[in-house]
Amino acid sequence: MSSLDARLGVLRGTAPPIPHSARTLAALTANPTCDRRSLIDAAGIDKAALAAHLNLPQPLRKSQLALDYGLAFEHKVTAQAGAPLVPLLRQALALTLPEASYQDVNSVGSDDDKSSLQLRHAHTRSRILSAAHRRPSQHRTLLDHPVLHLTVAGHQAYLEPDIIAFHRDGVFHVVEIKSFPVIHGQSDPLKVDAALTQAAAYVLALRELLADDGLPPERVSDTVILVNPRNFTQHPTATPYKAYQQIKSLSRHLGRLRRLPELLDKLPPHTTLDLAPGPDGKPTRPRGELAAALATVPARYTPGCRHHCDLAFHCRTEARNQRRTAALGTKVRDDLAGIDTIDTALALTDGQLHPARDQKDITQALQQAQRIYAELQTGIA
Ligand code: SF4
């Protein structure tokens, strides 16, 4: 075990680590400057268990009905060896193949059991490399339920894209099946961005696999295909999207995770978020002690955290208690860049604090806003 693993293990405590997934990686990019989230996820700490022990309300999750609907749509699209998908991809990727072969890696060597991740990864790897080197009789076009590896903070995370499609020129595309609709050619941009960020993890993992075999990153396209229900039906439609920005952003964030030893160095010695489960498995750690340990790991709360992090309500209370500008929203935080607390902003506005050179413009803007507010108040009176 590396010393980094050992240090992350101390932070995690006795619980087994939770592995990364494309979803958790995508969530990391939603708040890339939060050291707390970076360390907790790198250590594989169960955020939901921390939140439950701290008595926090859970963030909104998809209902079972929505999950079932998504699963049914995915089955419909990949039924009959991907038959409904092939014409869509031919159109979206301008494929000219008269026939498309299909392989489901979900169950390797057995018809009914789901094979282990390791076995499915080994099969995925060999099929992709065979195709990449264009060995005869290996013109597979669709690989369903492949399993890839991505190095995250020095660890191998297993990822499971919906589909990898590739054509004769040897360029691979990631295909994601999503249950949110395309209505008259338009999708919810936030959902598209989240789906592309998730797909970016698959693109990077695929590039890593090819790079290990000496193949260039351009062999994996940054065009990702999203397959969604069309209008208010269950009929699928495929749309190509450029995921370049999402790939760049995720890549930058993964690079940042290499700074984990630095982040760990800033914590007091022996800091742990262990829940100290008793013989019945229930946490015995006093809540105040856990909250104090969390407070030693710096956070960067924004209201968007409520959509992707179990600790959002804890961090929001903390940010409000510390009167952080970020608690008022990312717009306010960005407009007041360099002024971290509401008290500093007020002191600069009232002239009780002299602005530093880089705070002069924003101080003038705050004072102007205060004048307008005072005039409006006078007008109302
Ligand atoms: S909720 Fe807290 S830990 Fe999670 S990303 Fe936001 S600030 Fe970081």
Image (spheres, rainbow, N blue to C red):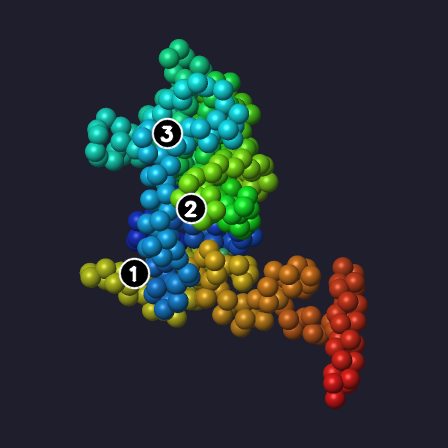
Q: Is residue 256 visible?
A: no
Label 1 CA crowd tier, 10 Å (few <14, some 14–19, many 20+) = some
Instruction: Point out the tag, 2 or 3, that comes first from the N-terminus.
Output: 3
Report the front residue among 315 and 180. Answer: 180
Above or below, comparing residue 236 to residue 136 in the picture: below
Report the front residue among 249 and 131. Answer: 131
Which residue sits furthest top?
136
- Mark nearest the camera among 2 and 3 is 2
Above or below, comparing residue 108 to residue 243 in the picture: above
Report the quarter where the C terminus lies. bottom right
* Mark-to-mark CA distance, 3 and 1: 51 Å
Q: Amino acid at mark 3?
A: Ala
Instruction: Point out the tag, 1 or 2, that comes first from the N-terminus.
Output: 2
* Mark-to-mark CA distance, 1 and 2: 49 Å
Residue 336 % position (x, y) = 69, 63
For disc 3, the marked residue is 83
For disc 2, the marked residue is 233
Q: Amino acid at mark 2?
A: Thr
Q: Is residue 72 visible?
A: yes
Residue 373 % position (x, y) = 74, 77
Q: Residue at x 42, y 46 (%)?
A: 233
Secondary structure of the residue carrying numbered label 3: loop
- Mark nearest the camera among 1 and 2 is 2
Q: Residue at x 37, y 61 (%)?
A: 50
Secondary structure of the residue carrying numbered label 1: loop
- In the image, the residue with mark 2 has its CB under 8 Å from the nearest atom of ligand 1: no
Q: Residue at x 42, y 61 (%)?
A: 59
Q: Residue at x 36, y 69 (%)?
A: 55
For disc 1, the marked residue is 276
